[in-house]
Image: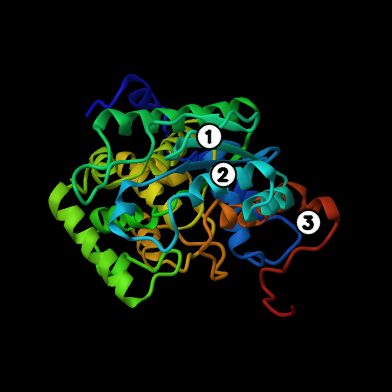
Amino acid sequence: MSISPLVDQTLAQIAPLDQAAMAAARARQDTLTKPLGSLGRLEDLSVLLAGMQGQALPRIRRKAIILAAGDHGVVAEGVSAYPQEVTPQMVFNFLRGGAGINVLARHAGAEIVILDAGVAADLPPHPRLRSVKVANGTSNMARGPAMTRQQAIQCLETGIDAAREQVAEGADLIACGDMGIGNTTPSSAITSVITGADVAIVTGRGTGLDDAALAHKVEVLRRAIALNQPNPRDGLDVLTKVGGFEIGVLAGAMLGAASCRRPVVVDGFISGAAALIAHTISSMAGSYFLASHQSVEPGHRIGLEHMGLRPLLDLGLRLGEGTGAALAMHLIEAAAKCLAEMATFAEAGVSERSEDDGKGS
């Protein structure tokens, strides 16, 4: 089904992983100065990176984090412990460099691209802020669709453009982060609809809801899904009816990165919901996704399992912003460097294991 010329072109450019590059990477792994498999998941990760980039020795020279912010009309239903004013306040914090993602991105040596996808406030111009605002927050999905189909397409196109721009500037690794008070609510809806899991199972406490508020959040979600009837096999329809502007932009960024053969680092629950949208639109795009960590939010595990993704870290994180993805970048880069920079047995003049021995350490 055609979506738009840009989205259609992007989907057509998403290719399967390069099996020849993966075979060459695996062959090199097996000759490096270490026992076979002794670097565990780092070895598998390096082979995946080779397949994604289409080269036997994957390289990570520049890292970028696309951080999209947006507000949600469903906050009017009382589903968040924080007021909506926190969204623009946190965007200002990102711009000042004082948020968790700023610290961890600096530590990882990653650039942050901050997008106003739909903050419910008029943010003043800033050299580090890109205004791609679709509207001042989504509509209340408990009363009708969160956005129009055209707005959902606009989100995808904005994300595609953002990812392609980063690739053009030399990014080899792209992560996605989010900000938006109330955005665990659409993320729960997306996860429930696409995976088929019950809303109560995939819905968590977000920013710290008590038991009564959590029960209310689940009731609001049931009402929104029953009212809108999103099609679980149509990612664009799910985004339109129960999504968020920042979620749509991140989904587009994931599709755009995959179309350029770039690995996508999926962050926590909201980034995972965006990945579910992108994966439903193009399952092949999911081949380029790397799950950074296991969020405390219960729906995150279910979403990752649906896409066949296994997180690299489990640190009890639930901040969002791309923080888990920034941490995982260290491991991803380490995997590529071990493959490229470790010496082979022949290069190092080290004797390989004897096939008929099997003894020793």
| Residue under numbered circle 1 | 123
Residue type indicated by callout 2: Val
Name above or below for residue 250 compared with residue 339.
Answer: above
Give yes or no for contact between labels 2 and 1 (Cβ–Cβ under 8 Å): yes
Q: Mark 3 points at which residue?
A: 345
Res. 295 visible in picture: yes
Colouring scheme applied when the structure was drawn: rainbow
How far from the left and from the top, in percent, is residue 58?
Answer: 64, 41
Residue 185 spot, x, y in % from top left = 33, 57
* Element marked by disc 1: loop
Q: Residues within 10 Å of mark 3 (few under 14, many from 20)?
A: some
The residue sitting at the top extreme is: 5
**If the image is split into quadrants, where does the N terminus sit?**
top left
Identify the element where label 2 is drawn.
helix
Residue type at mark 3? Phe
Hey, which quadrant is residue 137 in on the image? top left
| Residue corresponding to mark 2 | 91
